[in-house]
Image (tube, rainbow, N blue to C red):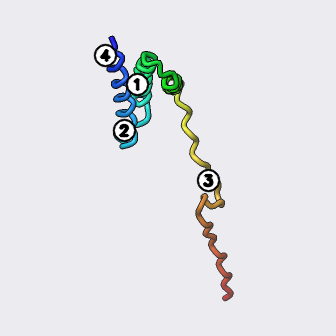
Amino acid sequence: MELLFEISGWAGAAAILTAYLAVSMGWLKAGKGFQTANLLGSCAFIVNGAFHEAWPSVVTNIAWFLISAVALVRMRSTQESPAPAAEAPPVQFPGVPETGQMAIVEAPRAARFT
């Protein structure tokens, strides 16, 4: 049984470190996969830490678990909500220069006297 708790701790370490490496190297975006790996890894660390009575580690990993769980719930709720309406294109009023551009005004033509 002790071997199972040790394997749990090492599997948790592998999950969290692999996710962190993948995000840090740009192989994975910090999304559902990253948060799921953190959630599972923290669970494994909680089991291992409780077995070894390493309470500071257990408390830290409970916080890690809660952060990942809340992030996953928030990701799910944003996916289920309808997409925001498309932003309206900016309005260009006649005679007003566009943002960042200088107005070019034609000089009035001189009247010809003949």
Spatial CA distance of label 3 from label 4 is 70 Å
Spatial CA distance of label 4 from label 2 is 27 Å
As shown in the figure, which amino acid type bears the numbered disc 2?
A: Leu
Q: Earlier in the sequence, mark 3 or mark 4?
A: 4
Identify the residue at horizontal 57%, vertical 45% (top origin). 89
Q: Secondary structure at mark 4?
A: helix
Instruction: Please say if the residues under marks 1 and 3 sit with CB atoms less than 8 Å apart.
Output: no
Instruction: Please say if the residues under marks 3 and 4 sit with CB atoms less than 8 Å apart.
Output: no
As shown in the figure, which amino acid type bears the numbered disc 1?
A: Gly
Q: Earlier in the sequence, mark 1 or mark 2?
A: 2
Dot 3 surroundings within 10 Å: few (below 14), some, or many (20 or more)?
Answer: few
Q: Would you place residue 23 above or below residue 93 in this image? A: above
* Quarter that holds the N terminus: top left
Q: Which residue is mark 1?
A: 41
Q: Secondary structure at mark 3?
A: loop
Q: Residue furthest top?
A: 1
As shown in the figure, which amino acid type bears the numbered disc 4?
A: Leu
Spatial CA distance of label 3 from label 2 is 47 Å
Place of residue 64 in the rendered image (x, y in percent of width and height, measured from the top left): 50, 27
Q: Which residue is mark 2?
A: 21
Place of residue 59 in the rendered image (x, y in percent of width and height, measured from the top left): 53, 23
* Quarter that holds the C terminus: bottom right
Instruction: Please say if the residues under marks 4 and 2 sit with CB atoms less than 8 Å apart.
Output: no
Q: Which mark is residue 92?
A: 3
Q: Earlier in the sequence, mark 1 or mark 3?
A: 1
Q: Which residue is mark 4?
A: 3
* 4 or 1: mark nearer the eye: 4
Viewer-side residue, 85 vs 8? 8
As shown in the figure, which amino acid type bears the numbered disc 3?
A: Gln
Q: Secondary structure at mark 2?
A: helix
- Picture quarter containing residue 31? top left
Identify the residue at horizontal 68%, vertical 87% (top origin). 113
